């Protein structure tokens, strides 16, 4: 069932990608008729501007000179990076659920013998590594993807806007969860703070995933 679910995600994502590819071809064909067509949007994330802006690192180093052909390649790269970001989001969500189950066992292991406690703690630390790798890899793909051609402005609350707001919350909570990890084994207060940060990260991340899925 799990494999079928991920297969459907891939099919759906790449189906969208094909439609977007045709739209991009139409847009870039207009460059021949309109020389002043803007190659970059007015607004970009600071990470995008640092790499892909008109005076960004990749422009100054001439690794990605700003041109219509180069931008078409960047949009293709952007689509692939965001598809991978989406897939990693589901992987991260599943890993967080598993980590929550293991963490619950660890926190309720007051009567466990040392061997059992160490086994659960080792599993908890291993799963934490999986969550961190998948989460921060997905975040990097989103933050450093090439910018779109244009920034679409939508009035009111939209799924994309909610996703961005929630991203600020779960990113901060993920950083806090890692910083508080050492204190969780030293005191009850440290354990509670670590748990609150972890639950905040999971709740906001799960909601951010769902608002784009549905």
Image (cartoon, grey):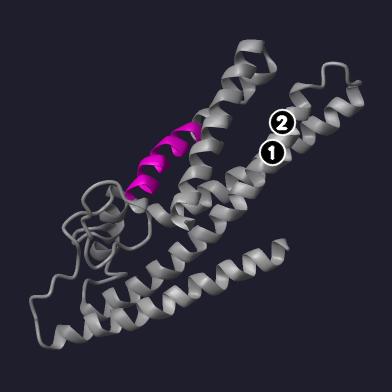
- Residue of label 2: 103
Mark 1 touches mark 2? (CB < 8 Å)? yes
In the picture, measured across the screen, residue 206 lies left or right of residue 81, that is right
**Quadrant for the N terminus in the image:** bottom right
Q: Which mark is residue 99?
A: 1
Residue 111: x percent and y percent?
88, 16
Secondary structure under tag 2 reads: helix
Task: Reply above or below: 83 against 89.
Answer: below
Location of residue 193 with respect to 62 vertically, above or below: above
Q: Residue at x 32, y 69 (%)?
A: 63
Residue 174 is marked as none
Majority secondary structure of the magenta segment?
helix
Q: Is residue 96 above or below residue 87?
A: above
Q: Which residues are magenta?
A: 161-174
Residue 180 visible: no
State the residue in front, 120 or 26.
Answer: 26
């Amino acid at each position: 069932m799990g494999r079928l679910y991920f297969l459907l995600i891939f099919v759906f994502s790449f189906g969208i990608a094909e439609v977007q590819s045709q739209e991009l071809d139409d847009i870039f064909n207009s460059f021949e008729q309109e020389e002043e067509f803007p190659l970059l949007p007015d607004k970009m994330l600071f990470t995008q501007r640092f790499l892909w802006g008109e005076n960004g690192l990749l422009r100054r180093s001439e690794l990605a000179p700003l041109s219509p052909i180069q931008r078409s390649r960047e949009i293709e790269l952007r689509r692939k990076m965001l598809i991978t970001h989406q897939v990693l989001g589901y992987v991260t969500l599943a890993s967080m659920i598993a980590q929550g189950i293991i963490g619950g066992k660890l926190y309720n292991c007051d009567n466990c013998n040392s061997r059992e406690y160490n086994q659960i703690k080792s599993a908890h630390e291993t799963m934490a590594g999986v969550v961190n790798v998948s989460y921060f890899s997905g975040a990097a793909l989103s933050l450093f993807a090439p910018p779109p051609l244009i920034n679409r402005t939508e009035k009111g609350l939209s799924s994309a806007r909610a996703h961005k707001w929630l991203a600020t919350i779960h990113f901060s909570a993920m950083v806090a969860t890692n910083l508080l990890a050492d204190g969780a084994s030293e005191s009850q207060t440290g354990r509670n703070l670590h748990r609150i940060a972890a639950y905040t990260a999971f709740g906001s991340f799960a909601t951010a995933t769902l608002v784009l899925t549905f």
